Image: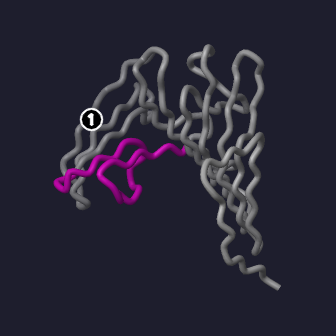
């Protein structure tokens, strides 16, 4: 493993002060920046800072932001880069990596809530689960909106406690 030298910059015109790590070959390994408005940027510099914490992950193989107890529990916020740009997920107990599903604690399911916007004019919100023991990915719910149509696909049984009231529905011609 190469040593990483940390470089602290003087404040730049955007008010950010950067801490950047470089290996001996000059390859950037880490960039953390902060400004006087108490905004923090982790990842690539030069990205518009819109929130209090912005994490930039442009590498396809990276799994994103991980919040973990270091043992059996994690939440992974994942955005994929090209060619999968437009596929964002919040994963519980795992993530997607290099074409395969990963579960941190194989005694539990990996749950995922995601939005897929890779197809032009079509958006999907979905919920699925992955069982690492059987290597099965099961779709539970898909909401699809696109090309003037909306659809809901619920996989499995539906139990309603209470009543369902019909609402006015407009069907485009």
Left/right placement of residue 4 relative to residue 133 reads left
- Residue occupying the far right of the picture: 173
- The residue nearer to you, when weighing 170 against 110, is 170
Left/right placement of residue 54 relative to residue 82 reads left
Write down the residue under mark 1: 7
Q: Quadrant location of the N terminus? A: top left
Magenta segment range? 35-58
Left/right placement of residue 90 relative to residue 173 reads left
Q: Is residue 20 inside the magenta stretch? A: no
Residue at 64% of width from left, 49% of height from top?
87
- The residue nearer to you, when weighing 127 against 44, is 127
Quadrant housing residue 134: top right
Number of marks drawn = 1
Spot occupied by residue 156 in the image (x, y as percentages of width and height):
77, 40
Q: Main secondary structure of the magenta part?
A: loop
16 over 28 or under it: above or below? below
Spot occupied by residue 11 in the image (x, y as percentages of width and height):
19, 51
Q: Is residue 56 inside the magenta stretch? A: yes
Dot 1 crowding, Cα within 10 Å, few <14, some 14–19, many 20+: few
Quadrant housing residue 62: top right
Residue at 48% of width from left, 26% of height from top?
74
- The residue nearer to you, when weighing 25 against 141, is 141
């Amino acid at each position: 493993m190469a040593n990483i030298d940390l470089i602290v910059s003087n404040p730049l015109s955007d008010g950010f002060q950067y801490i950047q790590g470089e290996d001996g070959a000059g390859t950037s390994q880490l960039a953390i920046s902060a400004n006087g408005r108490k905004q923090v940027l982790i990842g690539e510099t030069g990205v518009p800072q819109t929130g209090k914490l912005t994490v930039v992950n442009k590498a396809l193989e990276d799994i994103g932001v991980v919040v973990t107890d270091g043992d059996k529990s994690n939440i992974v916020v994942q955005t994929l880069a090209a060619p999968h740009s437009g596929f964002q997920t919040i994963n519980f107990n795992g993530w997607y990596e290099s074409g395969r599903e990963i579960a941190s604690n194989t005694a539990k399911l990996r749950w995922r809530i995601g939005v897929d916007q890779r197809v032009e004019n079509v958006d999907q919100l979905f919920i699925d689960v992955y069982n690492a023991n059987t290597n099965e990915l099961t779709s539970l719910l898909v909401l699809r909106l696109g090309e003037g149509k909306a659809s809901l696909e619920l996989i499995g049984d539906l139990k309603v406690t209470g009543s369902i009231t019909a609402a006015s529905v407009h069907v485009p011609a």
